[in-house]
Amino acid sequence: MAQAAKQSSYDVVIVGGAMLGSSVAWFTANNPDFDGSILVVERDPSYEFCSTSHTNSCIRQQFSNEINVRISQFGVEFVKNFRAFMGDDPRVPEVVLQSYGYMYLADNQEFAAILAGNQKLQQACGAGTRHMLAEEIARDYPFYNLEGIVAGNHNTVDEGYFDGNTLFDWWKRSARELGVEYIGNEVVAMTKNAAGNRVESVTLKSGEVVSCGQVVNASGPRAVLTSRMAGIEIPVEPRKRYTFIFDAAHPLDQDLPLTIDPSGVHMRSDGAYYLAGCPPEVDPPVDYDDFEQDHSIWEEKVWPTIANRVPQFEAIKLINSWAGHYAFNTLDQNAILGPHTEVENFMFVNGFSGHGFQQSPAMGRGMSELLAYGEFRSLDLSPFGFERITKKEPFVEKAVI
């Protein structure tokens, strides 16, 4: 049953309460300069089908744009000092970052040159990325079959995976303790003022009309359904991504970095098991409720690829698998963050295209600054603004998985 809002008016209404919505809620409520009211409306309080529940929970500094590197560096700082950021609350657990890094493999000189250029930029930002020739990779990770591989990039410093659900759970819990109201309901309509440049209220599925000062679209793959209520189109759609957990009859005697094979298949250690994933060969938008798995992807693409790249994986057993959705920005696979160019109080935190978990600390902080001050004060996140969508000018990021 839908939950009713306790008030008829809020300073901020956040549409979507998963990882990004809860990050925005917590950072805003935790900001001592913000003293307003916040309502988070989540259509599925179980979070069963949201992208947050299907994440692989990884973080990397290996990007080709400085701002994306900086975003991840703050994410690492936040993860490694999570309890301190949460006010040294003794209830909050420490979060461990498993730093065995990403290993990008290049099977041609053109991509190897791109990796080398990316490494220089990352190194200038303080990242620990190394550009490695095939023989150097073989020396450090002798389990790989490197036939056809000419080079790779690898970073074992503050890059790997972490328990992102701990962040998510504590953001929700702490936000509530700071006065944020969460309700299980759904925004079904928005009403703008006569000039059409502000959203004045949202209508809930249960029938209530709630006035709002700012609206934050944190609707994940459903972002365009939310934006259309304000008459706004954004290039965000659900794209299906597959994850497979497998056991190896002959496990490796060292950690498997998150390896990005030239085929597009990626794999990494995952506790006692291993994790692999990939996009489908044909990658269309899917229905919002379509989480059906295509088992031929495992049989025909993933298993052959990982068995070729790591010969010890010829004898493996599939333990679990699932399909989740990317909130895929078809313009440039980067986030859309900040206000609309015309509907000034409609705010985006959308289109992360698989980077949402690792970018959620910096993006939540940035959005909280916009809500409190009307400007970014920590990192300048303006390259992700909506204006580029209007102009159809992509913010190009070469390191997209």
Image: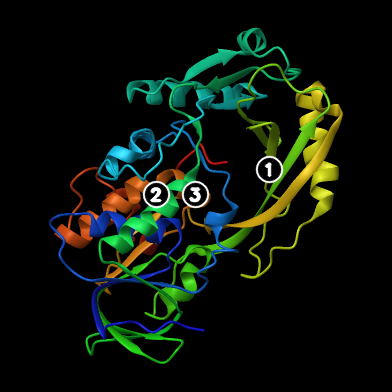
Give the quadrant of the C terminus.
Answer: top right
From mark 1 to mark 3, how far is it between C-alphas? 19 Å
From mark 1 to mark 2, how far is it between C-alphas? 21 Å
Q: Are marks 1 and 3 in contact (CB under 8 Å)?
A: no
Residue at the disc numbered 2: 360
Residue at the disc numbered 1: 277
Question: Would residue 250 be found to the left or right of residue 216 on screen?
Answer: right
Secondary element at tag 1: strand
Dot placed on the residue nearer the N-terminal end, 3 or 2: 3
Residue at the disc numbered 3: 165
Residue 215 image point, x, y percent: 30, 72
From mark 3 to mark 2, how far is it between C-alphas? 12 Å
Q: Nearer the viewer, mark 3 or mark 2?
A: 3
Secondary element at tag 3: helix
Type of the residue with mark 2: Ser
Q: Quadrant of residue 341?
A: bottom left
Dot placed on the residue nearer the N-terminal end, 1 or 2: 1
